[in-house]
Image (tube, helix red, strand yellow):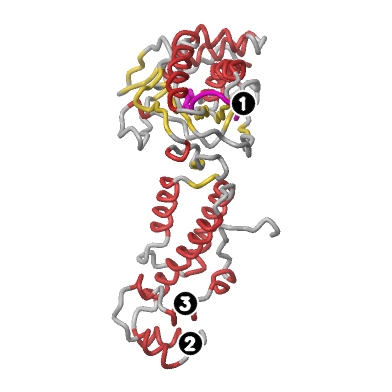
């Protein structure tokens, strides 16, 4: 991830993906040759399908100079002020368009071992397998392996240097790049100039359908959106929708497992999600999600208690007064509405779920 001084647009770049199913034995044994890689289509929800939807999940960035280790690195998280306007551009399946000679020239500038260079060239020329037949390829890289984003960054490193030379403020993480400008007109001008650089200098094709000039809050970047004045990082609406869909599936009332088992299943997902999106600057969103998850669990338990007498017993056992327990247990209201009933909330308070190990999404700085 890189950030530079003010200037251009908000842009989405490409990332190469390569399927690599060979270990270090390939270098030690020159007789081993990589075979054709089976072709798969990864669909981008924003495109609606097809090979143009082939994208790399932008959860990792590969350092552009570590060819022998390929270690995933966490991006630096910028806290700088962003500028009002922005443009977004995306390469059209850059992994499928990389020129082999240009790519190998960049690799050779950093790697002197001819055996490694020969192996990488063999992977590039290994072809793709469709319906059992291997077809040769003249450009691009097989998608899916750790080598692909690494090679992609070798090409995109030239873009970083060019944007730095121009004095633009930009932020790139793997194949995602935003370039911030002060006006729409500046964004359109920079969109054109950077597109020419990508096309003529790097020999990459820009996907016009995914390129746009827009306000920062109108676009998401790695699951986040940024307020127009740059003062606040927010979780993008699509990321919240995806999170809720996952929680709904994991807490569906027909699972038939105990609450401790359900919380045990939820814990890894919640901790991982918090570790990524806890970086947002909207704690109210996180606390609202916590309350929503607890209500899902109350609804889950209310269904498990099954009938009026058993519900009355469970409520009384948890300290609910007899009259309120009887009213709640005899109510014909649906599961979700009952999960917000005062008697149910009194019986299943927040500390009850904390005692079962339910993780919190919002952790204060002092904690």
Query: Separation of disc 2 and disc 3 at Cα?
Result: 10 Å
Of the pair 59 and 223, the residue shown nearer to us: 223
Residue 336 spot, x, y in % from top left:
36, 70
Crowd class of label 3 (few under 14; some 14 to 19; many from 20; radius 10 Å): some
Of the pair 89 and 166, the residue shown nearer to us: 166
| Extreme residue in the bottom direction | 322
Task: Say whether disc 1 or disc 2 marks the residue closer to the N-terminus.
Answer: 1
Read off the residue under disc 2.
320
Per the rendering, the mark at residue 103 is none
Q: Quadrant of residue 332?
A: bottom left
Query: Separation of disc 1 and disc 3 at Cα?
Result: 50 Å
Query: Separation of disc 1 and disc 2 at Cα?
Result: 59 Å
**Depicted 88 relative to depicted 151: above or below:** below
**Depicted 40 relative to depicted 115: above or below:** below
> Which numbered mark, 1 or 3, is in the foreground of this view?
1
**Depicted 37 relative to depicted 347: above or below:** above
What residue is rendered at 51% in x and 64% in y?
263
Q: Does dot 2 land on a helix, a strand or a loop?
A: loop
Residue 340 spot, x, y in % from top left:
41, 74
Q: Quadrant of residue 64?
A: top right
- In reply to whether residue 328 is colored magenta, the answer given is no
Q: Is residue 299 left or right of residue 284?
A: left
Residue 258 spot, x, y in % from top left:
46, 70
Read off the residue under disc 3.
345
Q: Is residue 7 left or right of residue 39?
A: right
What residue is rendered at 68% in x and 55% in y?
365
Task: Say whether disc 2 or disc 3 marks the residue closer to the N-terminus.
Answer: 2
Q: Which residues are magenta?
A: 1-19
Of the pair 212 and 100, the residue shown nearer to us: 212
Read off the residue under disc 1.
4
**Depicted 291 relative to depicted 108: above or below:** below
Q: Is residue 18 visible?
A: no
């Amino acid at each position: 991830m890189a950030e530079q001084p003010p200037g251009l647009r908000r842009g989405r770049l490409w990332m190469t993906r390569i399927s690599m199913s060979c270990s270090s034995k390939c270098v030690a044994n020159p007789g081993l040759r990589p075979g054709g890689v089976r072709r798969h289509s990864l669909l981008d929800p924003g495109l609606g399908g097809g090979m143009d939807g082939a994208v790399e999940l932008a959860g990792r960035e590969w350092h552009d100079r570590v060819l022998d280790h390929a270690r995933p690195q966490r991006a630096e998280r910028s806290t700088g002020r962003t500028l009002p306007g922005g443009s977004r551009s995306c390469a059209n399946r850059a992994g499928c368009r990389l020129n082999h000679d240009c790519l190998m020239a960049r690799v050779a500038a950093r790697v002197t071992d001819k055996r490694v260079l020969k192996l990488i060239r063999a992977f590039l020329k290994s072809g793709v397998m469709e319906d059992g037949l291997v077809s040769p390829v003249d450009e691009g890289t097989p998608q899916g392996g750790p080598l692909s984003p690494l090679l992609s960054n070798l090409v995109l490193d030239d873009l970083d240097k060019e944007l730095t030379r121009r004095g633009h403020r930009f932020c790139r993480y793997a194949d995602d790049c935003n370039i911030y400008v002060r006006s729409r007109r500046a964004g359109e001008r920079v969109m054109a100039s950077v597109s020419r650089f990508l096309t003529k200098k790097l020999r990459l094709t820009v996907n016009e359908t995914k390129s746009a000039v827009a306000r920062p809050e109108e676009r998401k970047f790695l699951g986040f959106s940024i307020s127009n004045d740059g003062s606040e990082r927010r979780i993008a609406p699509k990321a919240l929708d995806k999170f809720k869909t996952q929680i709904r599936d994991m807490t569906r009332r027909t699972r038939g497992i105990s609450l401790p088992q359900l919380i045990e299943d939820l814990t890894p997902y919640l901790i991982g999600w918090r570790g990524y999106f806890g970086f947002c600057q909207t704690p109210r969103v996180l606390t609202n999600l916590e309350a929503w998850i607890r209500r899902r669990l109350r609804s889950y338990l209310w269904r498990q208690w099954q009938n009026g007498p058993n519900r009355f017993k469970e409520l009384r056992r948890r300290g609910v007064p007899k009259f309120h327990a009887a009213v709640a247990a005899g109510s014909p209201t649906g599961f979700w509405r009952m999960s917000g009933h005062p008697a149910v909330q009194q019986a299943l308070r927040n500390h009850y779920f904390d005692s079962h190990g339910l993780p919190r999404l919002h952790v204060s700085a002092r904690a």
